[in-house]
Amino acid sequence: ADTAALARDSRLGDSLALARGSIVRVGEILWLWLRHDDAYALLSLDVTRSGSVLRQTFETVRTTGGEELRLISSTEDLARAPGNSLLYLDRRTARLWKIGPLGEATPLADVGDPPATLSAPSLDDRGRLVMFAPDPPMPAEQPLIPATRPTTDYPALIILDADGQRTLLGRNTFAAPDKINIRTLAPPQLFRDRAGWLAYDPQTGELLRIKLVER
């Protein structure tokens, strides 16, 4: 699909030049997510069908109540969900949504109050949602009243069970080589790889493998 075809099929027109693009594969379906501050589009492609082309099967993502979800985030918030669905992390409300093949959105869980740079959700081998939460930056101005010290030392892994129960594995549970400064880790996305995840940390230029080990 060249620029003209994407501008036409996404209905973004000339504003396509302003858009950021991401690719998410769910089974045999490849999704192209285009978005900028004022609009978004999701196009899909069946990689198993010869001659299949990118197409927009729905123009908007809506909840069962008719509310439109604005998928315009500049960060990576879409990920693979079970079946042929997508996961979307709405950072404005800190809520996770499941988006079906026809654009129907159903809520999965509330993340709570995570750092703004929380990674896109990923699934582990038990179907749990896993996200990496970096250490939030210090505020430019210190508040007059000291804030309550958080019970978790970031960075942390946030794990959400199917019933919405949240588990936080803080920095003190991490085991890493001495050359890696755990406190500064901030991978924007976790990529499932066998029994763990691969992650690229732009702060250090390190390619990491992250594994959960039950103790």
Image (tube, rainbow, N blue to C red):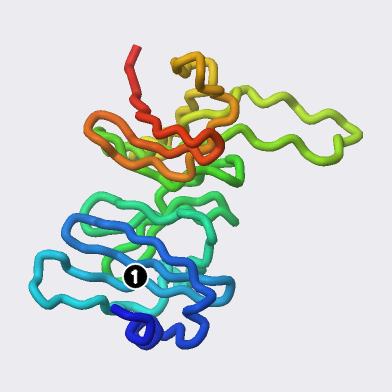
Give x and y (percent) for residue 124: 29, 35
Q: Residue furthest right?
A: 144
Crowd band around label 1 with a 10 angstrom C-alpha radius: few (<14), some (14–19), many (20+): many
Residue linked to disc 1: 103
The residue shown at (69%, 37%) is 137
Residue 44's x, y, as percent?
A: 27, 70
Quarter of the rendering containing residue 50 = bottom left
Question: Which is more toward the observer, 58 or 176?
Answer: 176
Q: Residue at x 21, y 54 (%)?
A: 83
Give the position of the N terminus as an image quadrant: bottom left
Percent across and percent down for residue 121 are 41, 45
Give whichever of 148, 163 is nearer the camera.
148
Q: Residue at x 33, y 37 (%)?
A: 128
On screen, 184 above or below 24?
A: above
Q: Is residue 136 left or right of residue 55?
A: right
| Amino acid tagged 1 | Gly
154 with respect to 178 (left or right): right
Location of residue 65 (image quadrant): bottom left
- Count the numbered circles shown: 1
Quick one: 109 or 8, which is closer to the camera? Answer: 8
Which percent across, then down, holds residue 20? Answer: 48, 67
Q: Is residue 151 above or below residue 136?
A: above
For residue 4, side relative to residue 186 (left or right)? left
